[in-house]
Image (cartoon, rainbow, N blue to C red):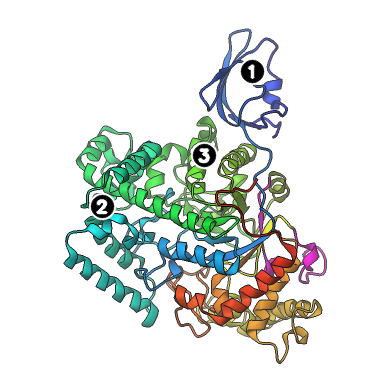
Amino acid sequence: AADAPAPAARAGRPSGPLPTALAALPAGTRLRIRTEQGETRASAEQLPEGVHELEATAPDGRTGRAHLVVAPARLPTPPGRTYGLLVQLYSLLSHHSWGMGDLGDLAELTAWAGRAHGAGFVQVNPLHAAVPGAPTDPSPYRPSSRRFPDPVYLRVEDIPEFAYVEDRDRVRTLLERADRLRGSVLHKGALIDRDAVWELKREALELVREVPLGPGRRAAYCDFLAEEGEALEDHATWCALAERYGSDWHSWPSGLRDPRSAATSRARGELMDRVDFHSRLAWLTDAQLATAQRSARDAGMAVGLVHDLAVGVHPGGADAWAQQEYFADGMSVGAPPDAFNARGQDWGLPPWRPDRLAESGYAPYRRLLRALLRHAGALRIDHVMGLFRLWWIPRGEAPTEGTYVRYDAEAMLAILALEASRAGALVIGEDLGTVEPGVRETLHERGVLGTSVLWFERDWDGDGLPLPPERWRDDCLATVTTHDLPPTAARLTGDHVELRDRLGLLARPLEEERAEASAETGEWLALLARLGLLDGAGGGAGVSEEAEIQALHGFLLRTPARMIGVWLPDTVGDRRPQNLPGTWDQYPNWRLPVADAEGRPVTLDELAASPRLHALLDVVRGRAAERCEPHTAPPGARPD
């Protein structure tokens, strides 16, 4: 609940004080409130939670309209302390996936991690729909749509209609091609080829679509179409038009650049078969996401899936086309110059217009959150500071020419609290890097968990040494590393410095970089030794790399952090980062399978049998059990 005025939205508790803007209205002002539940009221007292339409008429006849957001004061909190796994889903292959990890693998992972190891959650990369192309941008953080999932993650064999495809010879051929594609990644050193996987799956899905849906399945599909409405129709229409005219709507015939034009309406009718195909893919993917979350909860996970919300969308993609009125034309999101990048950054993502969001009652933001939280126990928000302000860069200008544009953080957080509470889901904000004063405090007050990465947790206001565990914050997800950082084994050995040197990314001589990295690692190992987490002083002779990784994770359990995350590649000693910021063609970002210390790809089955993985998870689970509440929860239970 907050009292500060905002352009078109207010946040408040159902029984809390009225926002300042309402309390300051002239005496005798008449209110007419149309609630989200469909009621009409004449008073703002005791309103139910929701986004309501407010009309105020002053005694002199002047009328004003706005939206009133009534939301819980805080988001749901973690149900005790829990630990979980972090993984880029595409990188997790099994003997059943077609060259990249899929939702069937995710369901298997959640069931195994929950039942065999007591894990409380599995966090994945954004599963948003990608922009098709040749080649497709492999980054999950530049999607075509954040609202709908990517069908490339479908497990084709798990679609009920697949078993009834009549052309069995073609099915066998597809399965043989899938086997070769999978084998090339697992056994021949090939990179994950998303385009090849999608080409194969699309062929299979075209066959699946020829199988008539049974009456129950047809009813479920119709329900999905009705629930998603215009948003799904727009998304599927963009996909159909992209097949014909290319994946950047700016280059389409002028009449088709407007989703509401007569030309687009005619094209939608002409392409109705393709629109239905892409609508069905969204339905099938949504169903498999539901299965993965159900598998997690059935396995006793207190949280289950943690989905990731990217900071924006591709300017040529489906969301940017369908929601043009909400995006700032000619602008891009990025970051100002800082100590790590003197030129700043341009991420190439168009920002939402805060004025249009407010005018709509934050409708696109609400729908986005609702879709992502439907099959999630928690949501990670990339660059959560974007709820407060974003660095806007005019098209064609350098990042240094940008400026911060503010959003109504009160309203954005109220909507977030409202939708997360309805879903019974946690929210984790990625708040690494430059954060303006007051933001972390505000997020803490509203119950948004932060992100604490071990290598960044130092006493920056004091001696600069590693921060002792008792001084860490408790309202966070604590990890040793992330997808944008070197795996822990690489940092311990210094391999990450050698890699950046080979790619010409070092700003200083190699020896200086080596010495600094070694000193920083040594300071952490010395602290672990003082805490009794290592058997040798400072990680010296006799202490293995595997033991050091276990000690680092054991350290996280000494902190008060409510959630502990284990980067899945760390469990088998992987040395290759999934993403190396600052590179494009020089490094295979977002295309590497999980691998062991020798770089050999490791399947999900091999992970489950890995002694090294079991030893690390035993450390985390065993020490967590000493300080945590039970990880299990009754089926269907939600955090409160």
As drawn, the label of residue 366 is 3
Tag nearer the camera, 3 or 2? 3
Q: Which residue is located at x 36 percent, y 48 percent?
A: 283
User: What is the total number of numbered labels drawn onto the structure image?
Assistant: 3
Q: Name the residue under label 2.
A: 243
Q: In the visual, does 508 lie left or right of 311?
A: right
Residue 88 can be seen, yes or no: yes
What element does badge 3 sit on? helix
Residue 156, quarter of picture: bottom left
Residue 338 x %, y %: 64, 60
Residue 195 x %, y %: 32, 65
* Amino acid bearing label 2: Glu
Q: Which comes before the other along the chain, label 3 or label 2?
A: 2
Q: Main secondary structure of the magenta part?
A: loop
Which residue occupies the foreground of this view, 464 or 554?
Answer: 554
Q: Name the residue under label 1.
A: 43
Asked whether the residues under the numbered discs 1 and 3 touch, taking CB atoms below 8 Å apart as contact, a structural biologist would say no
| Magenta extent | 447-473
For the residues marked 1 and 3, what is the alpha-carbon distance in whole angstroms? 24 Å
Q: In the visual, does 80 lie left or right of 189?
A: right
Mark 1 Cα-neighbour bin, 10 Å: few <14, some 14–19, many ≥20: few
Q: In the visual, does 178 lie left or right of 285?
A: left
Q: Which residue is located at x 34 percent, y 60 percent?
A: 158
What element does badge 1 sit on? loop
| Above or below for 351 versus 452 | above
Is residue 458 magenta-colored? yes
* Amino acid bearing label 1: Ser
Q: Which residue is located at x 23 percent, y 40 percent?
A: 267
Quarter of the image where the C terminus is located: top right
* The residue positioned farthest toward the front in the image shown: 634
Residue 448 x %, y %: 66, 49
* Amino acid bearing label 3: Arg
